[in-house]
Image (cartoon, rainbow, N blue to C red):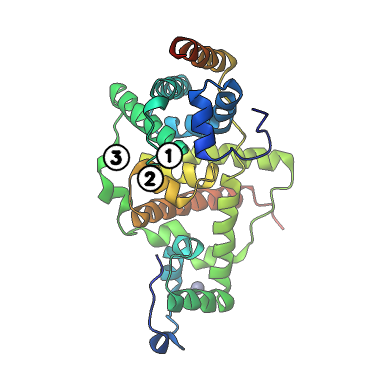
Amino acid sequence: MGSFEGGGLPPDDVVVTALRAGDEAMFAALLDTWSRGMLRVARSYVSTDHSAEEVVQDTWLAVVDGIDGFEGRASIKTWVFRILVNTAKKRGVRESRTLPWSAFEQDGGPFRDFGAARGGQADLAAAWPTPEGEALAAEVRALIAEALGRLPPRQRVVITLRDVEGCTSDEVCEILEISAANQRVLLHRARTAVRGWLADYYESVKQPE
Amino acid sequence: MKRFIPETRAVNVVKRFTCDELAELLTAYLEDALDQPSRDGMRAHLSCCEGCGRYFEQFRATIKVLGDQPPEKLSAPVRDRLMSAFRERHRHHS
Ligand SMILES: [Zn+2]
């Protein structure tokens, strides 16, 4: 197998056959393509970077052990990410971190604080600056990382998979086993919150005219 | 999922939205999850309401910067360990 750099991964049946045959280049390609998203997702459930890396490691070990039993009902990516989410959840519980995962009404319900989240029409006079300077871009990236950490876990996982990692909504629904409507509500609430924090930030760095 | 409405009823039906309602539907709009009258209503509102137009720009800008996070990597020791585990397993199974 050649390198997959730059291109996408081959179709699932090719990937699975290669993994079962012990193709190291294929395994390396999967590791390098999916691990970054896996680290981010794991971080939604566990408290430290170190824990997140262990979750990803345990997930890949489970994949290596379980590939012969993979039945192809879901895509291979969905299968790997589901193992990841389950591993991360268990670890999160072990770390006795509170997981509002069951409190769906709380972050999946209708907007109550809409005006606040939106910031009000009057504040919208100024357009956001383009983060063309590298310093501003770096600050915005740091702010986004912090903003993700402030979201409730369900919203955080969904926005991470969708907007940071570029998964499709179908993939996210399959990985998290949620409906399309729930996925959309969680994504929308997360985006609205992040937009609000970004707006505050842009307001705070605004140059006086 | 899009709702399919019989042609006769869909013609010239444009839903009207308040600014708050529009903001609440932006993700559904971007996901192409609205029925035709709602989508037309969103477009009509966005084209004539400056505040919502700007909010929509900011919303899209937010999605864009979210996709601009620096790439992450497994640490070299973990990656090496996983590569060996993969190699080992194949040796034992073949
Ligand atoms: Zn408006």
Determine which residue is flagged by label 2: A174
Residue at x-position 73% and y-position 40%: A134
Element type where label 2 sits in the image: helix
Front residue of A80 and A19: A19
Please, which residue is most extreme toward the right here?
Answer: A133
Quarter containing the N terminus of chain A: top right
Chain for mark 1? A
First-in-chain label (1 vs 3)? 1
Q: CA distance from mark 1 to mark 3?
A: 20 Å
Within 10 Å of the Cα at label 2, are there few (<14), some (14-19), or many (20+) other Cα atoms? some
- Residue A152 in sight here: no
Q: Is residue B47 visible?
A: yes
Which residue is pictured at 47% across the width and 14% down the height? Answer: B94
Tell me the distance, in whole angstroms, between the alpha carbons under discs 2 and 1: 7 Å
Among the 4 quarters of the image, the one containing residue B37: bottom left
Do discs 2 and 1 belong to a common subunit? yes
Tag nearer the camera, 2 or 3: 2
Could you tell me residue A209's position as x and y percent? 72, 58
Q: Amino acid at mark 2?
A: Glu
Q: Which residue is mark 1?
A: A78
Q: Against A52, is A186 above or below?
A: below
Marked residue nearer the N-terminal end (2 or 3): 3
Query: Left or right: where does residue B32 sit relative to residue B67?
Result: left
The answer to whether mark 2 and mark 1 are in CB contact below 8 A is yes
Mark 3 residue type: Trp
Quarter of the image for residue B83 reads: top right
Q: In the shown orientation, is residue B84 left or right of residue A75?
A: right
The total number of labels drawn is 3
Disc 3: host chain: A
Q: CA distance from mark 2 to mark 3?
A: 16 Å
Give residue B11's position: percent from left, percent from top: 45, 88
**Residue bearing mark 3:** A101
